[in-house]
Image: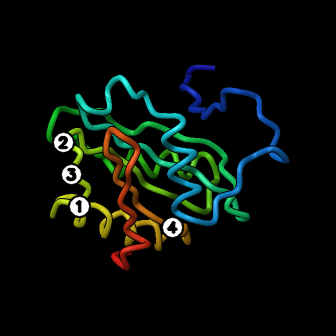
Amino acid sequence: MRNKVNEIKISYEGGIKSKNWVQVSTSAQAAEVLFEHWDKSTMQLQETFKIVLLNNSNKVKGICQISQGGIAGTLVDIRILFATVLKSLSVGLILAHNHPSGKLEPSEADIKLTKKIKKAASVFDIRLLDHLIFAPDGDYYSFADSGRL
């Protein structure tokens, strides 16, 4: 065997059986699940971008942190985002990030990124269900509820 290559795997931590996965059908349910799994000690210090990976029944397969940045932003590489989505065989996706300032209104960069991810997701028949923006106190903004998705 002359040609050796690395195998790429995705792993799930926690051992929760699929029959016990949480189902989300509203932005409030998604926000509750996400906020529960967010490091509250950094929410007002730096931006973090996460994705919720969903199966065909909108059950949460897992949450994955894609990036962590500075006070006013974080860089999201959509190739890394979709590598995770595709490798996990997810068919639904919820985006989320926090604004340390507490301002919930999406920035122009947030809007552009959401459109870019939605367009890429459609190529793979992946449903982008929402993009949530969190304030450190748990308040959130929903792109879907605001008609921006």
Residue reaching furthest to the bottom: 147
Rendered-image quadrant of the N terminus? top right
- Residue 75 drawn at (x, y percent): 23, 42
CA gap, disc 2 and disc 3: 5 Å
Q: Residue at x 61, y 42 (%)?
A: 62
Q: Residue at x 38, y 50 (%)?
A: 139
Camera-near label (1 vs 4) is 1
Instruction: Say whether disc 2 or disc 1 marks the residue closer to the N-terminus.
Output: 2
Numbered disc 3: secondary structure: loop
Read off the residue under disc 3: 103
- As shown in the figure, which amino acid type bears the numbered disc 4? Leu
CA gap, disc 2 and disc 4: 25 Å
Rendered-image quadrant of the C terminus? bottom left
Badge 4: how crowded within 10 Å, few (<14), some, or many (20+)? many
Q: Quadrant of residue 143?
A: bottom left
- As shown in the figure, which amino acid type bears the numbered disc 2? Ser
- As shown in the figure, which amino acid type bears the numbered disc 3? Lys
Instruction: Say whether disc 4 or disc 3 marks the residue closer to the N-terminus.
Output: 3
Is 125 situated above or below 117? below
Read off the residue under disc 2: 101
Tell whether label 3 touches label 2 (CB within 8 Å).
yes
Read off the residue under disc 1: 106
Question: In the rendering, which numbered label is found on residue 129?
Answer: 4
- Residue 69 drawn at (x, y percent): 23, 33
Instruction: Say whether disc 1 or disc 4 marks the residue closer to the N-terminus.
Output: 1
CA gap, disc 1 and disc 3: 8 Å
Numbered disc 2: secondary structure: loop
Badge 1: how crowded within 10 Å, few (<14), some, or many (20+)? some
Camera-near label (4 vs 3) is 3
Numbered disc 1: secondary structure: loop
